Image: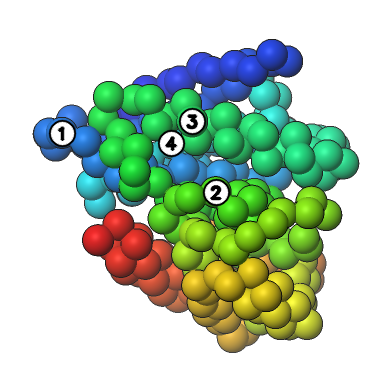
Amino acid sequence: MIQTTQLIYSDKKQSYEGVIAYDDSQKGKRPVVLVSHTWMGQSQFEEDKAKELAKLGYLAFAIDVFGQGRRAKNAEEAETLMNEMLEDRQELLNRILLAMETIKKNEMADAKNVGAIGFCFGGKCVLDLARSGINMKGVVCFHGIFDPPGIEHEGDILAKILVLHGWEDPMAFPKDIVSLGYELTERNASWEIDVFGHTGHAFTNPNANDPDGGMQFNPLANDRSWQRMTHFLEEVFE
């Protein structure tokens, strides 16, 4: 049976509250997959994704980078919370790394097999994680944002990267897709970008319904992207 547990963890500044999901019928250690949240903050959306990952045999951790109790109720609050993080991408990276190191200490965690997935703002987060050069298996970015963090990282990108994106996404245009490809190539990353036609931003979110703003749920892209992620994780954790 799939179980979920809240996990509160802290740095010197504040506490964070994430959710762990796992299959309690499974024995022993298992690969870890972080789930990085949208600009709204850690929510039921990410928890549900963590549960689906747990069904696949992973120890999933829906992380929190905004801080315990800091969740957006609307787009205006979400923009404020997100912009606080974007002003200091090193601090954002530190919070993702804190979540990773925290879950690796869990008794169910196979600490040598760690990956991450992220949605929208969370896609930016997992790309930043890979860009840091940390030794991890792979990251998956769903309809993310691609701008580099402005941090001078040295060396190759070690994590394999899968980007799943909508061609009509107004948050990252086709030219941005190409720029990301050049960036990852220059860092010797193993990367793949899958682009879905007639697809905008937030295509995995059933509540997204703003076609004029370029944000709308796309059931086909949603299903195909999850299948592609599933195969990618099987490959990197082989």
Answer yes or no: is residue 228 visible: yes
Count neighbours of disc 4 (C-alpha within 10 A) and say few if under 14, some if 14 to 19, many if 20 or more: many
First of labels 4, 2 by sequence position: 4
Residue 215 to residue 96: above or below: below
Q: Residue at x 64, y 51 (%)?
A: 132
How far apart marks 3 and 2 lie (CA) works out to 12 Å
Colour scheme shown: rainbow
Q: Which residue is mark 3?
A: 101
- The x and y percentages for residue 98 are 57, 29
How far apart marks 4 and 2 lie (CA) works out to 18 Å
Q: Is residue 33 left or right of residue 10?
A: left
Depth order, front residue of 153/175: 153
Secondary structure state at the residue bearing disc 1: loop
- The mark closer to the camera, 3 or 2, is 2
Q: Which residue is mark 4?
A: 61
Amino acid tagged 1 = Gly
First of labels 3, 2 by sequence position: 3
First of labels 1, 2 by sequence position: 1
Answer yes or no: is residue 65 visible: no
- The mark closer to the camera, 1 or 2, is 2
First of labels 3, 4 by sequence position: 4
Q: Which residue is mark 1?
A: 28
Residues at circles 1 and 4 in contact by the CB criterion of under 8 Å: no
Amino acid tagged 2 = Ile
Q: Which residue is mark 2?
A: 134
